[in-house]
Image (cartoon, grey):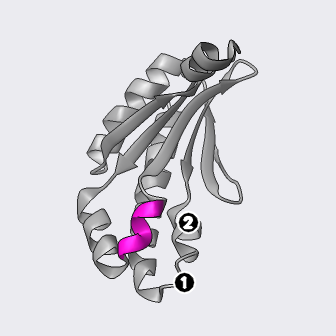
Amino acid sequence: MRSILHPFTLVATTPRAFDDAVGRAREVLAEEGFGILCEIDVAATLRDRLGVEREPYLILGACNPPYAHEALELEPDLGTLLPCNVVVYVDDGLTHISAIDPERLLAVADRPELEPIATEIHRRLQRVVDRVAAC
């Protein structure tokens, strides 16, 4: 399905089931050079801590080590903005995948030398979103 650009994310809706979309996200992230540093099952956390039931919602904290290294060499405090979150969730029965837009995220650093890194990570995350959404 088609991707949509939101103010700070890259988003697409997919006909894939949630578990299939999560599996595909893991595969495509790896193919694009990302590792998953952390995983947060938001639905389980809300259920366990608040007794709230919601549709599946998973955050994958993705990192592309060579680009992260390069960016951190330029701006050590950039670690506060890492990793790049990729989210797979169900809303009203539809599965969505979204990723933070690194160009907008890194713009807060106001460091022009980070722009090429942000652009490349944007391209890779856009491909992840598009490929997971496609069937």
Residue drawn 42% across the image and 69% down it = 78
Residue lying farthest front? 49
Q: Is residue 78 magenta?
A: yes
The residue carrying mark 2 is: 105
Give the amino acid type for the residue marked by disc 2 in the picture.
Leu
Residue lying farthest right? 92
The answer to whether 113 is drawn above or below residue 47 in the figure is below
Return the residue nearer the eye: 33 or 41: 41
Picture disc at residue 13: none
User: What range is drawn magenta here?
Assistant: 76-80
Mark 1: few/some/many CA within 10 Å (<14, 14-19, 20+): few
The answer to whether 40 is drawn above or below residue 117 in the figure is above
Name the element at disc 2.
helix
Residue drawn 76% across the image and 21% down it = 92
Quarter assignment of residue 27 = top left
The residue carrying mark 1 is: 110
Left or right: 10, with 131 as reference point:
right
Q: Position of residue 4 (x, y in %)?
A: 67, 50
Residue drawn 44% across the image and 38% down it = 60
